Every structure is written in C-alpha cells, then in structure tokens.
Amino acid sequence: MTGLFITFEGGDGSGKTTQINLLATWLEARGKTVVLTREPGGTDLGVELRNIVLHRKGFIAPRAEALLYAADRSHHIKSLVRPALERGEVVVQDRYLDSSVAYQGAGRVLDPEEVRELSLWATERLMPNLTVLLDVPASVAKARQALTEREYDRLEAEAEDFHTRVRESYLSLAAAEPERFLVVNGELPIDEIHQSIITKVSDLLG
Ligand code: TYD
C-alpha cells in the first residue's frame, strides 16, 4: 500500500471539520490527490446505515449499534478507502475505529477491547498511518455545539459525563499508541492547530 491514511478523532464539537478541510487544502496545494471521507456514511450503503444509527428514534441494542458502525466501516474500507490507498492517494477521514472504542465503550455495556477487535475484523486490520485527536473538554464542546443550533443526533444528546468518558477513552487510546496519535489541544487557535498537524504530516510525506 503506497498511500497515506489519516484519521481525525475527537468529541462532537471538537473542530474536526475545520481542521480536515484545512489539511485537505494544504495537501492539494502540494499536488496530492486527496480523498475526503467520513464514518459513518462514507458510501451509499453507509448513508443508509448512518440514518439508522444516528437518527432512528428509539432503542438500539448496544451490540446491534456496534455492529451497524462496523458494517458501515467494513463496506467503506473495502470499497472506497483501500482502493484509494492502493492508487497512492491520501485519505483524510473523519472518524474511524477509535470512535467505536471511545463511544460504544463509553456506554459501559461493551468491552472496549471487543469493540476494537470487531472493527479490526471488519476492516481486515487496516490501521491509519496517523490519527489526529482534537482534545477538548466536554463542557467546551457542548458550548460550541449550542452555537450551531441544529438538531442533536442520538449521541450528541447524551449527558455530559458520557462525553467526559469518551474523552478519557480517547486519551488512553492515544497514550497506548503514541506513534500513531497526534494529540492536539482543540482549544488552541485554529491556525496553531493546523500548523502542528501539517508539521506531522510533512514528516510522514518525507
Ligand atoms: P460525526 O458525523 O463525526 O458527527 P459530528 O460532526 O457531530 O462529530 O459523527 C456522528 C456521531 O457518530 C458522533 O456522535 C460519534 C458517533 N460514532 C460512534 O458512536 N461510533 C463510531 O464508530 C462512529 C464512526 C461514530
């Protein structure tokens, strides 16, 4: 595989979208072919699964929820991400398996190790070259989201202590794999965050 696989993680309202767009523009200015994508919902099938998992009213059993994210991920990696990496392109992706470990694990019902193993099975063990974690306290993320005034999805509506557990889980994932993760304080100015991301990506591009 000759391409570069970069994923972005962080709580809802951590500023991923802004940073992903800045990075894509920077990469394209350097002549790279960039595939911008996301989970859930990076494929046609994924859009259908995203609707179910984020907007369906009513209870979804925790294992079923984990399987829906894994189904989205499996199809997305097989049909879109791996082919792009094989063509030597740069894939910049909003959320990947760390989201499942952090969010589905934070419900306290599922074992985070099992959730991770499920995603690894689903993707034939594809790991990112770099995962950027935008770290912000749950209270800050919530305040930012209130400004956007759109309807909350199922997970955004969870209580603040859920989001605090998501954050803690992300930080321990990053501590366990310091080579793969770049943790950036998401409260820094937008351009400062962007600079630390492109410094790291420049290294990877060699
Ligand atoms: P996203 O589209 O990134 O929403 P936002 O722009 O609000 O951050 O993600 C939607 C939600 O899906 C988000 O609350 C996290 C959740 N999610 C999981 O719980 N597990 C997963 O595996 C993924 C990929 C997302």
Image (spheres, grey):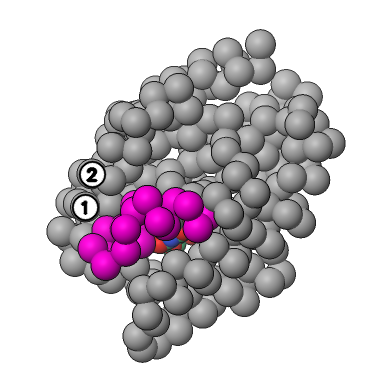
Residue 168's mark?
2
Asked if marks 1 and 2 touch (Cβ < 8 Å), the reply is yes
Cα distance between the residues tagged 1 and 2: 5 Å
Q: Position of residue 183 (x, y in %)?
A: 36, 29
Q: Quadrant of residue 189?
A: top left
Give the quarter the ligand 1 occupies. bottom left
Q: Is residue 191 left or right of residue 201?
A: left
Foreground pick, 148 / 50: 50
Q: Residues within 10 Å of mark 2 (few under 14, many from 20)?
A: some
Residue 47's mark?
none
Q: Quadrant of residue 76?
A: bottom right
Residue at the image point whose x is 44% and y is 51% from the top: 116
Residue at the image point whose x is 65% and y is 49% from the top: 124
Provide the residue designation for mark 1.
Answer: 165
The secondary element bearing badge 2 is classed as: helix
Q: Is residue 204 left or right of residue 136?
A: right
Image vertical order of residue 203 relative to residue 58, above or below: above
| Residue type highlighted by circle 2 | Glu
Q: Position of residue 94 (x, y in %)?
A: 53, 48
Residue at the image point whose x is 72% and y is 21% from the top: 30
| Residue type highlighted by circle 1 | Arg
Q: Which residues are magenta?
A: 102-119
